[in-house]
């Protein structure tokens, strides 16, 4: 066994200083050599102070591709599988450091074709708060596509988190848009659902009741802020002096785009679709308004066509001749989409959206209700 491995595994109080001196003398590559390499030894033994020293040397050294080297080692699995009694925040900090230095690790699979997100759902951190932060980190630095991937047994992260009854993991997965259908959770009543499926559905309904309304309000308000500025400029007749209003409209349309929603696919597509149409119609109404005119964008109606798509309709436009033809305002479209999503999973209590938090000037409210 090499000296640096012996020191790493030892209980010497000066072990971090000795490792520091060895790496300074022999080079940072020493931390990655051997089987197991000293860096893996440090993580397995819970010597995270030594592991951080090694990582500092690796990133500040002449190692050709440290990110690739770290990805091949698959150290995130070692962080999860060892030292179960370690404080969750300490483990979370090590995960954060490894992911920061080598995000490709998040797409590495083990022998069971599990990704790190599967592993952390199978063996959760000890507190709900760190579980939720961990999922945010794994998805933000990795990819949303990992949320619904399966291992060799066909289990998704949602299924593993439900089996572990880990509330923080479930909340984090749902916040980031995990799809219950991809985890083979059926619609309808509770009958026929396994215990883990019931826990997943209950967590999803809690998310719809508690988190989703605020998320939708943030999404709409994000779109409203540039529209307010656009209206302020248009009232001064600024657009009449511009030679390229089409370009300005494109810039405004980009600025007013709703923030991406991490929701189940069906619900996300419906809300994002109607928000996009709302923004486009609001911009068009603002640009063609006379200086000082009151523009009531929230009274814009949308019509459900036979293809199940929403189209913007001005108040003076005729009703679309189709089997649907329902004309609804933004508030009604969004509330209907949320109600239907909740009903798919057995929720019968109406979901209340906090429309009072909508950040618009008073003239926009007229006609919305």
Image (tube, helix red, strand yellow):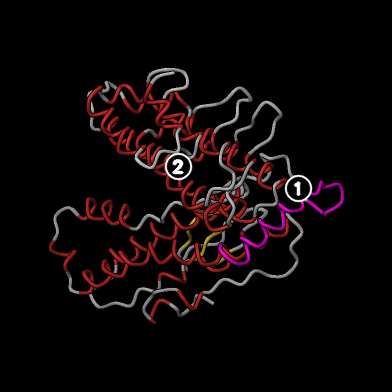
Left or right: 38 in relation to 232: right
Marks 1 and 2, Cα distance to the nearest angstrom?
27 Å
Whether 313 is among the magenta residues is: no
Mark 2 surroundings: few (<14), some (14-19) or many (≥20) residues within 10 A = some
Residue 197 seen by the camera: yes
From the viewer's perspective, is residue 318 above or below residue 43? below
Instruction: In this rendered view, identify the residue nearer to me: 349 or 286.
Output: 349
Q: Secondary structure at mark 1?
A: helix
Instruction: In this rendered view, identify the residue nearer to me: 270 or 323.
Output: 270
What's the mark number on residue 196? 1
The residue tagged 2 is: 95
Of helix, strand and loop, which mostly describes the magenta segment? helix
Pointers 1 and 2 in contact (CB under 8 A)? no
Q: Secondary structure at mark 2?
A: helix
Instruction: In this rendered view, identify the residue nearer to me: 257 or 238.
Output: 257
The nearer-to-camera label among 1 and 2 is 2
* Residue 267, image x, y percentages: 59, 52
Left or right: 27 in relation to 167: left
- Tell me where residue 345 sits by quadrant: bottom right
Whether 195 is among the magenta residues is: yes
The magenta segment: 188-211
From the viewer's perspective, is residue 319 above or below residue 107? below
Residue 68 seen by the camera: no
Q: Quadrant of the N terminus?
A: top left
* Residue 340, image x, y percentages: 68, 58
């Amino acid at each position: 066994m090499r000296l640096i491995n012996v020191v790493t595994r030892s209980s010497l109080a000066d072990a971090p200083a000795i490792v520091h001196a060895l790496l300074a003398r022999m080079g940072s590559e020493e931390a990655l050599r051997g089987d197991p390499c000293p860096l893996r030894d440090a993580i397995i033994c819970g010597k995270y102070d030594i592991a951080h020293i090694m990582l500092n040397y690796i990133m500040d050294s002449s190692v050709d591709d440290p990110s690739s080297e770290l990805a091949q080692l698959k150290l995130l699995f070692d962080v999860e599988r060892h030292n179960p009694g370690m404080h969750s925040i300490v483990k979370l900090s090590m995960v954060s450091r490894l992911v920061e230095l080598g995000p490709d690790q998040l797409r590495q699979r083990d022998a069971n074709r599990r990704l790190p997100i599967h592993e952390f759902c199978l063996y959760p951190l000890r507190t709900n708060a760190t579980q939720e932060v961990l999922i945010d980190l794994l998805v933000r630095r990795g990819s949303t596509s990992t949320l619904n991937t399966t291992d060799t047994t066909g289990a998704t992260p949602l299924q593993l988190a439900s089996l572990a009854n880990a509330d923080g993991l479930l909340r984090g997965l749902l916040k980031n848009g995990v799809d219950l259908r991809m985890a083979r959770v059926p619609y309808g009543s509770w009958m026929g659902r396994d215990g883990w499926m019931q826990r997943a559905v209950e967590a999803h309904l809690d998310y719809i009741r508690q988190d989703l309304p605020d998320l939708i309000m943030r999404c709409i308000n994000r779109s409203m802020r540039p529209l307010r500025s656009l209206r302020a400029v248009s009232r001064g007749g600024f657009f009449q002096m511009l030679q390229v209003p089409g370009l300005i409209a494109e810039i405004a349309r980009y600025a007013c785009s709703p923030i991406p929603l991490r929701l189940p696919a069906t619900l996300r597509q419906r809300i994002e679709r109607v928000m996009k149409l709302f923004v486009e119609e609001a911009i068009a109404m603002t640009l063609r308004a006379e200086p000082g005119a009151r523009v009531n964008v929230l009274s814009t109606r949308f019509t459900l066509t036979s293809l199940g798509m929403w189209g913007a309709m001005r108040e003076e436009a005729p009703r679309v001749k189709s089997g649907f033809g329902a004309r609804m305002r933004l508030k009604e479209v969004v509330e209907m989409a949320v109600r239907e999503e909740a009903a798919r999973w057995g929720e019968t209590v109406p979901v209340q959206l906090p429309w009072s938090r909508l950040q618009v000037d008073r003239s926009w409210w007229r006609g919305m209700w």
